[in-house]
Image (spheres, helix red, strand yellow):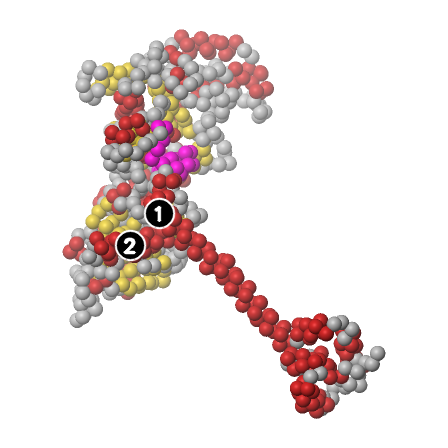
Amino acid sequence: MHLWGLLALTGAIWSARTEASSASSSGSAEQHYGKVVNQDDPDPLWDKYGLNKSEEFKYFHEPGHDDILGHYDSRYFTEPVADEERPQTMTYMVRAYLNFFEENGLETWIAHGTLLGWWWNGKVMPWDWDMDTQVPDTTLRQLADRYNQTVVQYSTKNADVQRTYLLDINPWARQRENGMGLNIIDARWIDMQTGLYIDITGLSKINPDKPNLWMDKHEHQYRTEDIYPLRKTTFEGVAAKVPFDYDAILIEEYGKNALTSTHFHNHTWIPESEEWIPDDQVADAIDDDKQYE
Amino acid sequence: MARYSNIDDLDYADDSSDDGLHSFNDNNNSASSYRLTKYARPLIDYVRNEWQSNPKYASLPTTNSDTSDYPRWVQMLGSIVTAPRFRRYVLVYTTVLVSCWLGWKFVVSPRLEEHAAILHALDPQVKEEVGGWFGANALPRFDIIVQLRTLEPSLLPGEVTSESDEHGGRRLIFIGDVHGCKDELERLLEETSFNPDTDHLIFTGDMINKGPDSLGVVDLAREYSASCVRGDHEDRVLSLRHNMIAANTMNDEFLDDANMHRGQYTKERQLARQLSEEQADWLDTCPVVLNVGQIKDMGQVVVAHAGLVPGVDLDKQDPYSVMNMLTVDLDTHVPSSSRKGIKWTKVSYTLCFLRVCNRRLHETFENPESMLTTVIYGHDSKSSLSLKTYTKGIDTGCFKGGKLTALVVGDGGKQKTVQVRCNNHT
């Protein structure tokens, strides 16, 4: 497996946005924000990065909002990936992601639906269109400062398959409060050939009274003991990490049935082969005449 | 109105008499009652408390004469109710009835319901209805965790009881959560007359952390080539240690404080640093589940730190749950570390019970007892010693000043528990 990272400077998009936001006055910030802002307090978001809280703009765009188009990045989308190619595309993408983070010593773990897929058989679930990972805010800052716009080449064992991925950090990732709710995804790992991506969200402690509580920008909450110490495991055949109390996190988010129900999204879990099989193929997979929806 | 007209009735109104039946007859004025009153009369005449002359007793007959205005059956009823013996009976019977009802309502009925609920939960037909039970997934694999080990069969006690010498045969000594209480552990071994040549020690996890001498406990266990399972405390400390090695922070305590989110595990990180490589490696070999093997009268003996999800194979038991569970959800069999829910031991009991009672098993297997599983576990110090037919909970809270417990299993499956008192190390 050959991997290399290339550090690139943020392009014209970044500077254009910076100019756009500096044009507006910084004084209107507190109108959109419930809390009183001390005028003497420097706002690092504004001072250093030229981001005006009152004019938060959505950074990541998708070509549509439905189940198919909602899972592509507009910049790299041409046409939806065929169903037959999608699982392989997702597998390559997450392997490249996990390898890159591992090689650069960046702390990350798999989350949400991706974690559920790991729990069932260490793989992406066949009906999953996007993947999710989480990082602590320390990693997120590292990503923004040192790895933003990195383009990573990934070649599989058969050398003719080459993929390129872009690590794109949302400029609003530096704002850890929810803000206007337009930028709950802090970063993306984008397949530059297809536009499919992995959503990366950062967790931070924003409540000083609860030093135990980690939050993303989308109302997910975790306790330190749910996540740390992270556990080393494998996902899609490569080294990955999962939260310490993975059971509690999955039950909290998806309910107990997510860990027991063997029918999901027109797929059936076949314990013998440890795979989710589409219901229309189940009859072939199990030798009986049971009817499935 | 004649105040004393009803003088015969006096003694049923008088508290000095407690014969309810007697006064009832008086009121009837029947022949037999006359005879009784006749015998009673002289006695009352001897009473010298001025009951006849003092006006303060006069009010009693008045009430009686008032009631005489009511129909006869009311009077009868009144006399029954006011009779002290009757009142006592009523009180006694009411108490008995109420306690029966309470017993049914709060003890028997909930147990029957619980039993029915557990039976229902184990019904394979219900599995279809709820969509599946916990444990169907491919087991998550972790780099540093050993899932299952089987004990060397030569360490098992013999089939038959050795008659000559009590300590002649081989013994297995299962020891509950030690939590670094080395002094207590040494006393316990003395108490069991531990002989390293014939006895094999098996720890139910949580040997380390909290207490005064975790490293000493690990060294002792290593010295005697003991067996062990991974407890939640080993799990946390060892996971931290592996991550610290990977992040290169083993030698630099300052890095802990610099990285705020790990401040939570200060004690655990300290212990992780203190563990030598050999000690940590030894602890890493402790499996999540230890299959001890067949022991007479106990069936297949299995050691797990907190518990096992009933009905799931040992190699498919979810590691986090095995180290932390206390209860299971009856619908889905999802284990939980919360106390709300049905204790896994109860479900386990019913499942074992079903297996032994199942006729088909008797037909298929010559020795259905071999299908039994006895789980020996720790973790639950709040429930303290909990020795049931198929589950043996032996964490008795040594670290908190409780006891340290050993379950000794000798030849022929003979079991006994040995305990020593512990100092409070909190």
Residue B354 left/right relative to B106: left
Residue B233 left/right relative to A252: left
User: Which of the pair B243/B145 is nearer the observer?
Assistant: B145
Residue B235 falls in image quadrant: top left
Q: Earlier in the sequence, mark 1 or mark 2?
A: 1
Q: Where is residue B180 in the image (x, y as percent from the top left)?
A: 32, 52
Q: Are marks 1 and 2 on the same chain?
A: yes
Mark 1, residue position: B123
**Residue name at image x 29 percent, y 60 percent:** B407
Residue B408 falls in image quadrant: bottom left
Q: In this view, does A109 lie above or below B36?
A: above
Q: Which amino acid does label 2 sit on?
A: Asn
Q: Position of residue B374 (x, y in %)?
A: 28, 55
**Which span is picked out in magenta?**
A242-266
Mark 2, residue position: B358
Local secondary structure at mark 2:
loop
Local secondary structure at mark 1:
loop
Label 2 crowd (10 A; few <14 / some 14-19 / many >=20): few
Residue B244 seen in the figure: no
Whether residue A257 is in magenta: the answer is yes
**Residue name at image x 38 percent, y 15 percent:** A73
Q: Where is residue B403 in the image (x, y as percent from the top left)?
A: 36, 60
Q: What residue type is labelled 1?
A: Asp
Q: Is residue A181 above or below residue B44?
A: above
**Residue name at image x 45 percent, y 23 percent:** A184
| Mark 1 vs mark 2, CA separation in Å | 13 Å
Label 1 crowd (10 A; few <14 / some 14-19 / many >=20): few
- Specify the farthest residue to the left: B154
Q: Mark 2 lies on which chain?
A: B
Q: Position of residue B424 (x, y in %)?
A: 40, 57
